[in-house]
Image: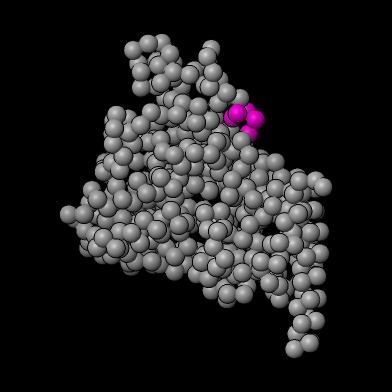
Amino acid sequence: MNAPAYLDYASTTPVDPRVAAAMARCLTAGGVFGNPSSSGHVYGADAQAAVEAARAQTAAAVGADAADVIWTSGATEADNLAIFGLAQHAKERGRHIVTARTEHRAVLDPCRELERRGWRVTYLHPDRGGILDPAMVASALCADTVLVSIMHVNNEIGVVQDIGAIAAACARHGGARLHVDAAQSVGKCRVDFAGCGADLMSLSAHKAYGPKGVGALLVSRRRGVQIEARQFGGGQERGLRSGTVATHQVVGMGAAFSIAAAEQEADGRRAAALAVRLRTGLAALGGVRENGDGARAVAQIVNLSFEDVEGESLLADVAAEIAVSTGSACASSSSEASYVLRALGRDERLAESSLRFSLGRFTTAAHIDRAVAAVTAAVTRLRRIAGVCATAS
């Protein structure tokens, strides 16, 4: 049997061969293998130069200054560093945080932990399309609000929030810093850290065809943003994230972001055409509902619910043919319906019977056709069984 067609790029992507080649040069003798903190010899100096080149590549791809880039192990660590680091630094000014019900667990769980430690958190509800009205953010700001954390591109439904308008609301408030989880954004839509007015931004390499295990937190120097460190040791990364920088990882991230920025437009056109093919093919089933405002979403993420189908059975039925998911990879161990879809007003049954198709650089029309055939067969079979059971009862 052929391997299942991979349509789960929002969870993780394969490393682009060009990225792998750049990383390989940092792994063996004869390449850039030194410790970038050991500047006393040529091997360390070469590694440091490679790290700084990757920092510049990453910054250029997202409209940031190179000095803003703090390397982390991924977007989860970046989210935690931003939220805990800012909350701790600003605790004398206020202990109120604003976020949304549809954020990633890497934002929601730190917020809940801060609640246990005495902070207040306001959780905003987006509309049924997943869009958060910037006016709602503005109305939630209080005298003691120190942080607003809002995702740019939602990882389950792909909707894009108006970060510029939300940043403007925070600026009018005067004391609230804005953190943006942009893990899903790079290569899918334009990211302009300096231009959008955000203070902190979390990034992930592996969502942009880079390696797993590396990301970055952007901390705006221009805006005078200060946070407290969560990890101590050798004082690397402006003292905010001590530890030897993994040269091969950050070189991979820099290469991946550079390629993603250069090929974003072409990748987007391909994904949009494939998404139309997918929606058109599945529409013939009837009883198919799209989750999220498609007009405000990136082309690469399509989330659909199928009426009169039991969710776990649907996923099991298609697993041999296509690799898709029902939501975030970080929540896949839970049998509960997607909390993102529930926040949009989907009932439990529809939320459970949803599939997230995420299209990537290596998705082909043949993969889409295989997905349409597999889902059509599964939904048809499961609806027939459900109809038989309903008649029998």
Q: Which residue range is magenta in the image?
A: 16-20
Q: Would residue 188 be counted in the magenta stretch? A: no
Q: Nearer the viewer, residue 63 or 283?
A: 283
What residue do we see at 58% from left, 74% from top?
Answer: 348
Which quarter of the rendering shows the C terminus? Answer: bottom right
Tell whether 287 sits left or right of 165.
right
What residue do we see at 66% from left, 66% from top?
Answer: 312
* Horizontal and vertical percent position of residue 121: 32, 64
Q: Is residue 35 above or below residue 135?
A: above
Q: Nearer the viewer, residue 227 or 241?
A: 241
- Quarter of the rendering containing residue 138: bottom left
Q: Is residue 97 above or below residue 389?
A: above
- Looking at the image, can residue 166 be seen? no
The prevailing secondary structure element of the residues shown in magenta is helix
Residue at the farthest bottom position: 393
Q: Is residue 10 above or below residue 37?
A: below
What residue do we see at 27% from left, 56% from top?
Answer: 146
- Looking at the image, can residue 66 be seen? yes
